[in-house]
Each structure stands twice: as C-alpha cells, then as structure tokens.
Amino acid sequence: MTISAVRALTFDVFGTVVDWRSSVIAQVEAVATAAGVTGDWAAFADEWRYDGYIAGIGRVVRGEAPMVTTDVLHRAKLDELLPRYGLAALAEPARDNLNRAWHRLEPWPDSVAGLARLRTGYIVSTLSNGNVSLLVNMARHAGLTWDCILSAEITGAFKPSPRCYGEAVRLLGLEPHEVMMVAAHKNDLLAAAKSGLRTAFVPRPLEAGPNRTVDLTPDPSFDVVANDFHDLATRLGCA
C-alpha cells in the first residue's frame, strides 16, 4: 500500500495541534496572580499533564482503573495540586473554570492555516484522548476547523489501545490503510501503525519544555516526516 490511498488524516491534539504547556502555564499563573500567590507554574503544568493526565490514562489502559473522561482525570489531579501550590482556598466555580483551561489551549502558529490546507485534500479529524466537549470547545477557541471529532470517549478506549484506532477507522467508514495518523508523539504513531494506519510524524520540539528530554528522531517506519502542518500539506500534495 502507498500513501496515495490515504483519504483521511486523524490528528493527535495535545502537543501536536495545540501548545498545551504554554497555554496552561499562562492560565494557572493568571489565577495565582489574582489570588496573590507566587509559585513555579511551569512545574504545576508539568505535574498536571504527566503525573495526572498521562499517568491516569496509563492506569486505565492497564485495566487498573475504569474509563473516565479527560476532564475527570484533570480535575482529580488539580484538586491534589492546588493545596501543594498554595491555592487551597480556590473554590467552586473557580476550580471548575481552571480545570477547563484544557478547553482553551492555543494552537501552534501553523496549525489553523495548515489544517485548512490539508482539508482541501483529505478528511481531517481529531483522534484524541480528550473528551468530546473539551475538543469542541478547544476547536472553537483556537479556530480549528475539523470535519469530525473522534476521541477516546467515542471509541471507548484511550490511545494507545488498538481499539481506539480501529474504532476510529470504522467510524470513518474506511480501511486502516486509508487513514493516516498525524502526531508529534512516536508512541502514538507506532501504535497506530500496528493497527494498520499510515503515519505522519510532525515533531514539536517546544512542547515538553526545558525540563524533559524527548526523543524527536523519526522512526524509519513512519510514512511521512514533516516540519509542521504546512510542510505536511506540501508533502501530501495539498494546495
């Protein structure tokens, strides 16, 4: 099979399409400043993401916890972090609003226009572990135009479970080789490839910040490696 058979592109969202880290840091810092609290808000964001969201997904995938939405995972970790960072006094609905910081993430500079170009030649859809309401709100906030919103909440499984990729392909009415997974994360693409999807690697060197080392070397198995969404559009023959 060649990539000429690809009809749809499914996108990882956190980190690939939007700059979650800078967006979350800015929103937490604004809340803390209003409360007169100082702290390491970059560390707060990293803990929220990696020790909360990522670790929570891992427990679900391993069968150690029931399936829940990303909003639930984020809120559980947020309630743990707030007292440790001097924000224990933050009450509802302020906590709920802060938890929705993940609904208000900013896109990478190439994301909006790049997706528009890719959409001229392909169906473009999310395939994210984020829940549907989060992805819809994020799309409206960031100006992201999707043909379809697919997520773990719809497929019934978090990535990198094969069920997530397989259900996405089924819902699109396509065959696995007709769908290309686009992501900045190698593990996502390698898992998608095992389910028969084609793969496009778009590394985002700034995603993880200065405190984490991320391997950005493309795997030889990836079908396409692009610098950003405009480069991806060019490589896929989009105007």
Image (spheres, rainbow, N blue to C red):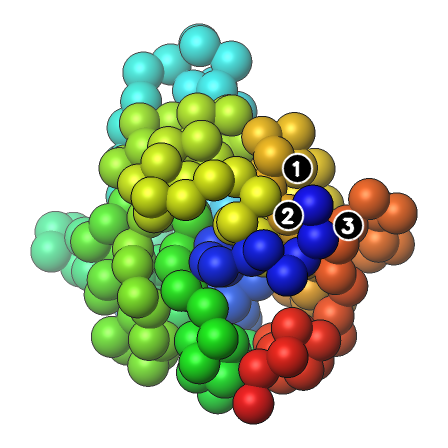
Q: Secondary structure at mark 1?
A: helix
Q: Amino acid at mark 3?
A: Phe
Quadrant assignment for the N terminus = top right
Residue 65: name its quadrant: top left
Q: Residues within 10 Å of mark 3 (few under 14, many from 20)?
A: some
* Residue 172 appears in view: yes
Which residue was labeled with disc 1?
Answer: 193
Upstream in the sequence, badge 3 or badge 2? 2
Residue 189 lies, with reference to residue 139, above or below; the image says above
Residue 206 lies, with reference to residue 66, above or below; the image says below
Q: Looking at the picture, how far across and down is residue 33, in whole percent? A: 37, 74
Q: Residue at x 44, y 10 (%)?
A: 63
Q: Residues within 10 Å of mark 1 (few under 14, many from 20)?
A: many
Q: Is 235 left, or right, of 131 in this rendering?
A: right
Which residue was labeled with disc 3?
Answer: 222
Q: Residue at x 48, y 75 (%)?
A: 121
Residue 143: name its quadrant: bottom left
Q: Depth check: 162 or 205 in front?
A: 162
Upstream in the sequence, badge 1 or badge 3? 1
Q: Residue at x 50, y 84 (%)?
A: 117
Q: Residue at x 87, y 54 (%)?
A: 217
Which residue was labeled with disc 2?
Answer: 198
Q: Depth check: 10 or 34 in front?
A: 10
